[in-house]
């Protein structure tokens, strides 16, 4: 089953969020608005808004209130992508030119900052102080993660703990916050929103590990960028860490730098795939997935719980 079919009953509300996202980035600066719109129109799974909506189903669901939370979380996600593309000097995202490649780094950074600010503005409709504390803590972690990503570039002495901490900040914590804030904003009970936070965290970890695997196993057509791009940009992901346990792979990886040619990169990718690194990475992703599924045991049965389970399984087992 396709991902969108799993939550098709939310289509009207998701369509409303899409319109709200466009409204959210309206600006008196035509350049800022055009750059923001470029990212929105580039598409995306909208996983974070979907999690906000589903989590809100465990409380008093009011789309006109919940939509603000969903928009805020997606804006934060998009802002972090714009900043990531500057950090990685990325020309393409999802097969389309990045904001920084269409304009420049300065415009891209201001675009990301603008989206962060609009996200905070959208959250003001939520009167719960705990929700604002969770959001601000999340944004701090995301920003710290961006700085750490810069420091870790081409740092081949990283360990598993460094990697897990980085992907927590890069991906997992924002998905966890989406789940928790959706529930909080709808007035769900404390045990519910805490269970949803843990669910989102574990799904997010599995999601990012799978993404990092796909960077080596998927085609460039599917990825919208050349395979192995993360490593070429200096990002040491889980398959690389596991692969480097093999002496031959370790030697090949250590030679990768910004100007490494395509032929040499192809050899590195093949060496990593020939090792046990992909299988080991899948195993860790599956461990996080199983934790996420066990977190759902604390939630009441029904369509929403089943949908969360279906999405988690899709995320953890996708091949593209």
Image (cartoon, grey):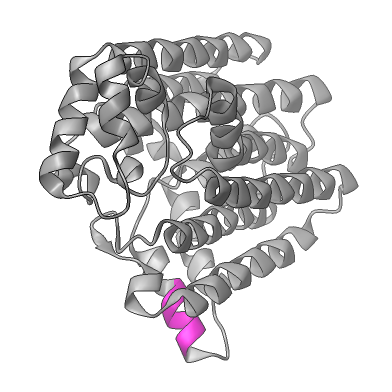
Which residue is at 50% across, 30% downward? 157
Residue 305 lies, in percent from the top left, at: 54, 20
Q: Is residue 148 above or below residue 84?
A: above
Q: Nearer the viewer, residue 139 or 64?
A: 139
Please identify the quadrant where the N terminus is shown. top left
Q: Which residue is most to the left?
A: 263
Query: Would residue 111 be found to the left or right of residue 193 on screen?
Result: left
Q: Is residue 304 above or below residue 61?
A: above
Residue 159 lies, in percent from the top left, at: 53, 23
Inspect this view and state whether residue 2 appears: no
The question of residue 67 being in magenta is answered with no
Q: Nearer the viewer, residue 143 or 72?
A: 143
Which contiguous range is marked in magenta? Answer: 31-36
Q: Is residue 223 above or below residue 259?
A: above
Residue 24 lies, in percent from the top left, at: 57, 71
Q: Nearer the viewer, residue 261 or 20?
A: 261
Which residue is at 37% across, 14% downward? 245
Inspect this view and state whether residue 296 appears: yes
Residue 311 lies, in percent from the top left, at: 42, 26
Which residue is at 54% across, 61% downward? 79
Task: Report the number of numbered marks.
Answer: 0
Magenta region, main secondary structure: helix
Please identify the quadrant where the C terminus is shown. top left
Q: Name the image quarter holding residue 180.
A: top right
Q: Nearer the viewer, residue 261 or 310?
A: 261
């Amino acid at each position: 089953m396709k991902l969108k079919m799993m939550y098709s009953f939310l289509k009207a509300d998701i369509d409303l969020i899409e319109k709200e996202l466009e409204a959210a980035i309206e600006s008196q600066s035509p350049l800022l608005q055009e750059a923001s719109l470029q990212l929105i129109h580039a598409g995306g799974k909208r996983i974070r808004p979907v999690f906000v909506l589903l989590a809100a189903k465990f409380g008093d669901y009011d789309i006109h209130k919940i939509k603000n939370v969903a928009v805020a979380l997606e804006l934060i996600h998009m802002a972090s992508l714009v900043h990531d593309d500057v950090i990685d000097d990325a020309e393409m995202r999802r097969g389309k030119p990045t904001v920084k490649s269409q304009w420049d780094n300065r415009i891209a950074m201001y675009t990301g900052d603008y989206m962060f600010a609009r996200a905070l503005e959208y959250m003001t409709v939520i009167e719960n102080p705990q929700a604002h504390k969770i959001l601000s803590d999340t944004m701090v972690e995301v920003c710290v993660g961006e700085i750490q990503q810069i420091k870790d570039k081409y740092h081949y002495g990283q360990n598993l703990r460094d990697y897990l901490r980085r992907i927590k900040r890069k991906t997992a914590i924002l998905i966890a916050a989406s789940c928790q804030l959706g529930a909080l904003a709808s007035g769900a009970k404390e045990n519910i929103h805490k269970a949803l936070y843990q669910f989102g965290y574990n799904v997010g970890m599995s999601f990012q590990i799978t993404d990092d695997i796909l960077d080596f196993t998927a085609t460039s057509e599917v990825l919208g960028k050349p395979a192995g791009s993360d490593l070429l940009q200096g990002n040491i992901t889980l398959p690389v860490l596991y692969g480097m346990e093999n002496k031959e792979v370790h030697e090949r990886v250590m030679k990768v730098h910004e100007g490494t040619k395509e032929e040499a990169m192809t050899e590195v990718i093949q060496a990593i795939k020939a090792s046990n690194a992909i299988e080991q990475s899948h195993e860790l992703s599956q461990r996080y997935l199983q934790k996420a599924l066990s977190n759902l045991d604390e939630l009441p049965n029904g369509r929403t719980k089943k949908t969360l389970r279906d999405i988690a399984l899709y995320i953890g087992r996708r091949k593209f």
